[in-house]
Image (cartoon, rainbow, N blue to C red):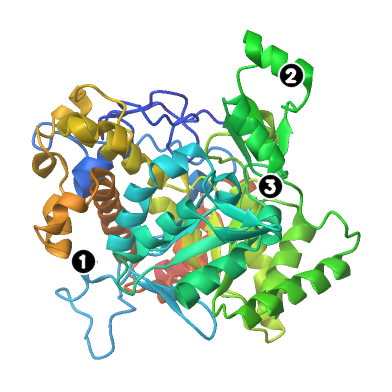
Amino acid sequence: MIQWSKTNDALGTVNRGEPAESGLCTLCRADCQGRCETFLSSMAGRKMLYPKDFGMTTAGSKNTTHIGVSYNSVRINGGNYGCVGLPEGVKASVDSCVFPNVDIETEFGGEYKTKSTLPFLTGALGSTMIAAKYWDSLSIGSALVGFPIVIGENVVGVDPNSVIENGKVKSSPELDRRIEGYLRYYDGKGAIIVQMNVEDTSNGVAEYVINKFGDKVVLELKWGQGAKCIGGEIQVDSLERAMFLKERGYIVDPDPTKPEVQESFKNGSIKSFARHSRLGYSDLSTAEQVREQFMSAVDTYRSLGYKRITLKTGSYGMEGLAMAIKLATDAKLDLLTIDGSGGGTGMSPWNMMESWGVPSILLHAKAYEYASILAAKGQKVVDLAFAGGLAREDHIFKALALGAPYVKMVCMGRGLMVPAFLGSNIEGVLNPLRKSEVNGNWDKLPQSVAQFGKNAEEIFIGYYDVQKKVGSNEMKNIPYGAIALWTLADKLAAGLQQLMAGARKFSLSELSREDLYVGNRETEKETGIPFVTDVKDEVAKRILTS
């Protein structure tokens, strides 16, 4: 197993726990006083693209990221001449081919396009407590920046204030809060996407959303995720809450209706309950049956008025991957998100995350291969998004290039939640009266934050950019977590622009697999991306012998 380094002396970053491939700790805590790259980038922004202590140091890469098969074994192929992708009419020159001129806006979809300021979207943030507590920061921040955010599964079902009559939702204050919070700052870039699982479908969530919000909302069907091969889970520590969820029709473990379980909870041996969702398509036994039911569901949702429909699939094997790409293409869906194994937002069974499914780089490489087969038959392949352990600007570049031209977006889950945690903790210290409202966890600023300043204006390098966007009067309504998310997004954007400029590609549509090579032969075999010294080796030799 590859062990990623916990420290980066060049950037001055330290992971509290063991880092995953993404660079985030395996267990990312909302109360962390941190020093990981994502944590610091949520305050310092694009300054974190560079080594620390300029003028006092020199820096050299450890160059150990080529070990094993992973996204970190893929390297970016920079060019030493040329420039493509500038706007029509702009002549390539040393003045025009500069990284701030790289266009990283994108769009996805079929008949109705969804535009995005940046080529990423959040992972699905559903019924987990951590998603609910930090939603305002995440939704307002993503709306201000202009990229899509996904409301995950089961929000209606677990909302104690939702009204469900005869099995259908009549009102859901929590779902309304999430949608309305995003739409308040939405300015035409990005999207609010509502995900549907088995329970959501049964409860009539799609009908409720379209009737209340119309086609402002994108609908996402769900086949699973990279964290687990069973339905979603949350944990509750109240017997009353467990009974409520059981009555709502969920699987609750242990069963709170059993007298012996109630007695164990009363005496403290059972301290919490796990709520589980159900498996989809359990009544089907063939791929053709899945196809029939899926296409019928898409037709039904379109008849309700949904103009944009997407699909999220997990790290199933090759049959499931091919089915997702084929059906999403045939149904003319707007986006298919393909999530590789490993990530989760707090309640996925740990050894399932460790052991189930296809790792991201392998799943994504096959997705490109399968999409190419459909394209060769003359089909317009559904736009793709890749997900699974992606958090940095180099990950974004690599995923977009690996799946080009089909991949339009990168889906990031845990990485985009860090600024929400951080900003809320800072706001809770600086504005104690709002500590409980924003779910702050700190009583004072740690040195990792205090080094940047003593107020929001000093701490967040993106503060005044946000203020310019919303106006000084509106800043009082912007949570610090949203400012932190803006700041992190700015760092990711600048880093992506720099990498693309180095590859001489000045628009996302120009990215291709030729912009990558790999650092070992095993990764070459698994991805189809050539080994570093093989790329244009023959061209190089012709130069030498000419």
Where residue 311 appears, as percent x and y from the top left, is 62, 65
**From this viewpoint, which residue is outermost toward the bottom?**
89
Instruction: Tell me, yes or no, if residue 79 can be seen here.
Output: no
**From this viewpoint, which residue is outermost toward the front?**
165
Few, some or many residues within 10 Å of mark 1 (<14, 14–19, 20+): some
Q: Which residue is mark 1?
A: 100
Secondary structure beneath disc 1? helix
Q: Which residue is mark 2?
A: 261
Where residue 48 appears, as percent x and y from the top left, is 24, 43
Residue 368 higher or lower than 341, as above or below: below
Q: Which residue is mark 3?
A: 358
Q: Is residue 60 left or right of residue 160?
A: left
Judged by depth in the image, the label closer to the viewer, 1 or 2, is 2
Q: Quadrant of residue 12?
A: top left
Name the kind of residue labelled 1 in the image.
Pro
Judged by depth in the image, the label closer to the viewer, 3 or 2, is 2
Q: Label 1 near label 3: C-beta < 8 Å?
A: no
Q: Is residue 324 left or right of residue 457?
A: right
| Closer-to-camera residue (363/498) | 363
Q: Quadrant of residue 502?
A: bottom left
Quadrant (top left/top right/bottom left/bottom right) for the N terminus = top right
Circle nearer the N terminus (1, 2) = 1
Q: Residue at x 79, y 60 (%)?
A: 319
Few, some or many residues within 10 Å of mark 2 (<14, 14–19, 20+): some
Mark 3–mark 1 Cα distance, whole angstroms, equals 36 Å
Circle nearer the N terminus (3, 2) = 2
Where residue 280 appears, as percent x and y from the top left, is 76, 55
